[in-house]
Image: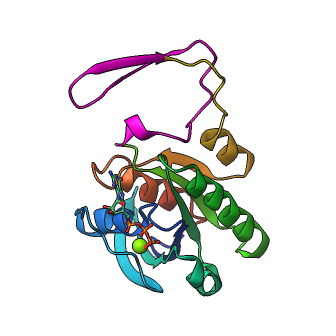
């Protein structure tokens, strides 16, 4: 097969979920606390090595604001891969992510490699979207900036992101553009899953 390939990739997701921040981390290794909301879309490219081949991603970072929704098909049409981003501290952003998955399943390239990224994973104390089923009675331990805390789960948490991803043919990772957790990994995993020429 072809050792060097180009792949069009689109990021979709709610306003403020962290799409631009993930791209900035991946492409430039930087993070900005006051990242400006994207207008229209922004283009970047970055190459990753997989085994003995390279994949040059042509990345479309779309705007999450609803008024730009009608532009989205221009960016996901013909895309080989999509990263659908939500913010783990914002339930509405997860609901919005599911809507994007539905739209891609209906209108996108059927062979598209799709990743679901639960971003802002550094904000554990503010988590609203469970990554996996947390059974009743589980004692959750987490540390806040200056104290150790724990709480008992008194209600089954919904098996949200992981299960949703499995049922819909996406792969799932929690990411943090701030700490760089899993950012390169999402792109590498996509590169590995792309159909080879
Ligand atoms: P639109 O362009 O409006 O669709 O938003 P976006 O999805 O591109 O979000 P953006 O990257 O602009 O991030 C929104 C805010 O969240 C910014 O203030 C970022 O600094 C912050 N942010 C992004 N990723 C993370 C993260 O992983 N952790 C934390 N703590 N903050 C983040
Ligand atoms: Mg943006």
Task: Name the residue nearer the viewer: 44 or 72.
Answer: 72
Q: Position of residue 166 (x, y in %)?
A: 68, 44
Q: Is residue 129 above or below residue 48?
A: above
Task: Name the residue nearer the viewer: 4 or 91.
Answer: 91
Q: Is residue 57 above or below residue 142?
A: below
Based on the picture, tell me whether residue 124 belongs to the magenta stretch: yes
Ligand 2 occupies quarter: bottom left
The colour scheme used here is: rainbow
Left-right relation of 102 to 95: right
Q: Position of residue 81 (x, y in %)?
A: 57, 68
Left-right relation of 27 to 140: left
Based on the picture, tell me whether residue 137 belongs to the magenta stretch: yes
Magenta-highlighted residues: 123-151
Q: Position of residue 195 (x, y in %)?
A: 61, 65
Residue 45 position by quadrant: bottom left
User: Looking at the image, which residue is at 34% across and 64% down?
Assistant: 21
Residue 48 seen in this snapshot: no
User: Looking at the image, which residue is at 64% across and 40% down?
Assistant: 160
Task: Name the residue nearer the viewer: 33 or 187.
Answer: 33
User: Looking at the image, which residue is at 36% across and 50% down?
Assistant: 176
Residue 21 seen in this snapshot: yes
Q: Residue furthest right?
A: 106
Identify the image quadrant of the C terminus: bottom right
Task: Name the residue nearer the viewer: 62 or 54.
Answer: 62
Residue 20 position by quadrant: bottom left
Q: Position of residue 99 (x, y in %)?
A: 69, 63
Identify the image quadrant of the N terminus: bottom right
């Amino acid at each position: 097969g072809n050792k060097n390939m180009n792949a069009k990739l689109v990021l979709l997701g709610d306003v403020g979920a962290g799409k631009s921040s993930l791209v900035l981390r991946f492409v430039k290794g930087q993070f900005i606390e006051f990242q400006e909301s994207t207008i229209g879309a922004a283009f970047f490219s970055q190459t990753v090595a997989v085994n003995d081949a390279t994949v040059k991603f042509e990345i479309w970072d779309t705007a999450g604001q609803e008024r730009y929704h009608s532009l989205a098909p221009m960016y996901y049409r013909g895309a080989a891969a999509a990263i659908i981003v939500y913010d783990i501290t914002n339930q509405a952003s997860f609901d919005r992510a599911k809507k994007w998955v539905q739209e891609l399943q209906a209108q996108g390239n059927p062979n598209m490699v799709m990743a679901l990224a639960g971003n802002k994973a550094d904000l554990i104390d503010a988590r609203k979207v469970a990554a996996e089923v947390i059974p009743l009675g589980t004692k959750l331990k987490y540390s806040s900036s200056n104290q150790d805390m724990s709480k008992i789960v008194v209600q089954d948490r919904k098996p949200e992101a992981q299960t949703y991803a499995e049922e819909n043919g996406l792969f799932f990772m929690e990411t943090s553009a701030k700490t760089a957790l899993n950012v390169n990994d999402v792109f590498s995993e996509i590169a590995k899953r792309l159909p080879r020429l």
